[in-house]
Image (spheres, rainbow, N blue to C red):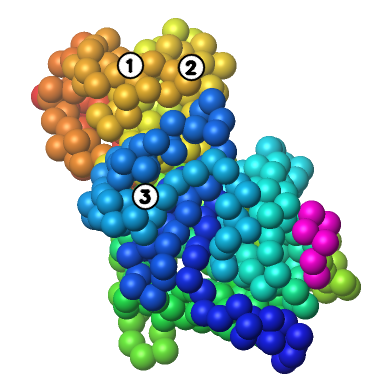
Amino acid sequence: MNSRLQSIIDRRGPIRKIGVVGMGYVGIPAAALFADAPVFESVLGFQRDSRSSGYKVAMLNRGESPLKGEEPGLEDLLGKVASAGKFRCTSDFSEIAECDAVTLAIQTPFADPKDLIPDFSALVEGLGQVGGHLSEGTLVVLESTVTPGTTAGMAREILEEESGLVAGEEFCLAHAPERVMVGRLLRNIREHDRIVGGIDDVSTRRAVELYRPVLTAGKIIPMTATAAEVTKTAENAFRDLQIAAANQLALHCEAMGVNVYDVRAGIDSLKGEGITRAILWPGAGVGGHCLTKDSWHLERGAQVLGGDLRYPHGAESIFGVARKINEFMPRHMVHLTIEGLRRAGKSPEGAKVALLGWAFIQNSDDTRNTPAEPYLAAMEEAGAVVRVHDPFVDEYPGIEVSHDFDGTLAGADVVTIFTAHHHYASLDPVRVKELSGREHPVIVDGRNVVDPNAFIRTGFVYKGIGRGDKNSHEVVPGR
Ligand code: SAJ
């Protein structure tokens, strides 16, 4: 145990004042929950007074949430803690000096996943702000998803450089990755188990003191900072891998003339103690802000941190291959579309495509890294005219997203389903064909949403991910 740091902590006493840097979908609920915990005296939310986000300061001080979409309980909780004087938002980072603990919840996207170089610029700026006002005995916690090695490496260096203090001797440093999902932010923080990893035992214990009061069903899982970074990136890499396995199986089933959903149900039926077959769902691709980047964080960590990384000679990382399979699926949707058009006697040149679903996940307006985007680009590249429909999405840079279902389908040669919004589960083949006005319209189902037979007997050319049993069906005159 580090006695010098421990004695500084003992002199400082229990955590009372908390700072949260980054008023986004991770920082805001975290700050509200810290402020609502009776054991803590007050919470400061730190938000840069930037053109794009400075408006949040006044909103949050009125107890209003600047987050889009429904977040059950958040606005009420913000109103409660703001009016009780337990939470205040500020862009004056010098107030960090008063805080016993400071968490950083700042986005860490990849500039370009291909080169594995994350864009840590916002995080570096936040760390500089914290380091510049750090006082002895403060606990600093990174909540952002980072490449393994960042907390004990880059973050530690910046904090020490800016503060003149030594991590693990004069201040505590830890990583406690967020596991929140939009739509259930408060619930996730309270109920998910919390990984808490310090650069040393004193830091870990101090971080446990910070997070334990906000957990209800969740429990604390302590470990080292680097193990916590690996856990976070690996838990998403594993999910990406499971989806890729389902996608590869779907491609095999198409080639073997088999319905992948029959095979999936068969595999899933193998249950019993100690037996796990967590087979997920094949589909049109993997979007979102987690799975599309965390495997690359994990890979980069292994490269940067890994000593003599032992691996079968010449074999590619399974996580990298999984990313390639998942990124291939929108391209496969293009293959199915062009094959379908060919069966209908059409070329993609000039074909009208109705693209149903722009959000990356069903019944949501979240469009980050939507797999529909590479599909649209490739179809336009092939000369098609693509119209996008999504009942949840109002706008997207450079793309016109319509809420007019009939208008989107009017004159369509192809109807492509990219997102399993509940609206699309009840597509009526007769109505869709009428709207398309085509003898043999093509339907490409990326999420196993429609009944192939209902569309085939209405005269559609059907193509579906994993539907090797249907993708070469006889084209019949529609009823
Ligand atoms: N997807 C499939 N097949 C599946 C599941 C998902 O193709 O079987 C696709 C979705 O269509 C979507 C993408 O993958 O395009 C991501 O879907 P997701 O359900 O993983 O949703 P995310 O990206 O919001 O992942 C979040 C993550 N949660 C946190 O980071 C706290 C992830 O760790 C969770 O495992 C995931 O939610 C979850 O389980 O819901």
Mark 3 and 1 residues: CB-CB less than 8 Å, in contact?
A: no
Q: Earlier in the sequence, mark 2 or mark 3?
A: 3
In which quadrant will I find the C terminus?
Answer: top left
- Reply yes or no: does residue 163 show up in magenta: yes
Q: Earlier in the sequence, mark 2 or mark 1?
A: 2
x, y percent for residue 333? 46, 34
Q: CA distance from mark 2 to mark 1?
A: 23 Å
Name the foreground residue: 257 vs 443. 443
- Reply yes or no: does residue 468 show up in magenta: no
Type of the residue with mark 1: Asp
Q: Which residue is mark 3?
A: 182
Q: Residues within 10 Å of mark 1 (few under 14, many from 20)?
A: many
Type of the residue with mark 2: Gly
> Which is closer to the viewer, label 2 or label 3?
3
Residue 405: name its quadrant.
Answer: top left
Magenta span: 161-166
Q: Which residue is mark 1?
A: 413
Q: Residues within 10 Å of mark 3 (few under 14, many from 20)?
A: some
- Rendered residue at 68%/48% (across/down): 129
x, y percent for residue 178? 49, 61
State whether residue 363 appears in this view.
yes
In which quadrant will I find the N terminus?
Answer: bottom right
x, y percent for residue 20? 51, 56
Left or right: residue 299 versus residue 217 is: right
